[in-house]
Amino acid sequence: MSYALVFSGQASQHPTMLPWLEAEPLAAASLRAMSQRIGTDWRNALQHEASRSSNTFAQVLITGTSLAAWAAIKDQLPQAPAVVAGYSVGELAAYACAGVFSTEQAIALAQQRAELMDLAVLGWQTGMMAVTGLSEDRVLAVCAGLGLECAIRIHRHQSVFAATDIVLNQATPLLVALGAVCKRLDVRVASHSSWMAPAAQDFAKALVGLPFAAPLCPIATDADGTLSRQAATLRQALSRQLASTVQWAACMESIAERQVACVLEIGAGSALAKMWNERFPDIPARSLDEFQHAQGAVQWVLRNG
């Protein structure tokens, strides 16, 4: 059996995500640790845009629910994943899944990460926008001089860009005129860009005193898109990704090179599973959020893995 796990990032959260989660006894400890920071009424909060896009709320929620979902299914699988990766804040859950640090530490880091990111853009209105249909180079050429930065590389004709709201609004009609599809994300900060340099520096300092255990499996890091099991490398990559482009295309390539039989996305939504299926159709991928019950996801991995 050989499977990979990819952990969802921000902007995928929704009120009906993982509807079975609270009924799973093994998920309770992770949900409790999460709820101590964002409240027990998190599902109701997700119905309101202000809460849903709040950086601190969203990053803690994504980390906590992802690790709760993994706790609910991991003991039903005969072996650990062959490789893991996390998309943006999802990297915290990926590290915890691999045993680098605990669930409680991952949730605490999610809150600290979000607070530092908010502080980095205090007084500014910034955000992120997915652009499909144009290459990164073409987007940046069309928007030259505006201050647009590539935040996440997904594939040749799909990337996510970060900037101020004013810049994103200026860029949109220019890109749409060339046939691009532009979608603003439920993210209030210019993640993975030079705006986050102060946050990356402070987060690196926060990680210095946190013990990093050797992971149970290789981790594909956002900062480089390469696999690592070295604590020093993983520590540096986790902070560096805040202010540098997430190399998600390279992460997917690194996972595929491990010759896994299937890929399961852990978290809300199915964006990562869709990205995978478009890029590697011969290796099936599903999202945990697509199943009505945790057992359905377990059976799918057992059949395909």
Image: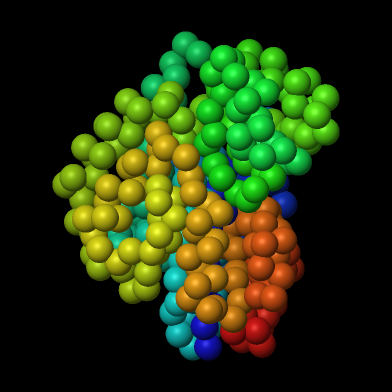
Query: How is the protein colored in the picture?
Result: rainbow
Q: Image quarter for residue 198?
A: top left
At 66% from the left and 40% from the top, the residue drawn is 135
Provide residue 116's location: percent of width, then percent of height. Answer: 36, 29
Provide residue 24's location: percent of width, then percent of height. Answer: 57, 69
The residue nearer to you, when weighing 181 against 190, is 181
Q: Is residue 284 left or right of residue 69?
A: right
On the question of residue 124 being in view, the answer is yes
Q: Image quarter for residue 119?
A: top left
At 67% from the left and 62% from the top, the residue drawn is 279
At 54% from the left and 42% from the top, the residue drawn is 152
Picture quarter with the C terminus: bottom right
Provide residue 132's location: percent of width, then percent of height. Answer: 73, 41
The residue nearer to you, when weighing 125 against 158, is 158
Q: Is residue 26 left or right of residue 299?
A: left
On the question of residue 22 being in view, the answer is no
- 65 is higher (above) or lower (below) than 185: below
Q: Image quarter for residue 166?
A: top right
The residue nearer to you, when weighing 268 against 6, is 6
Q: Is residue 99 left or right of residue 185?
A: left
Provide residue 58's location: percent of width, then percent of height. Answer: 54, 40
Q: How many marks?
A: 0
The residue nearer to you, when weighing 250 against 69, is 250
Q: Is residue 236 left or right of residue 220?
A: left
At 42% from the left and 37% from the top, the residue drawn is 244
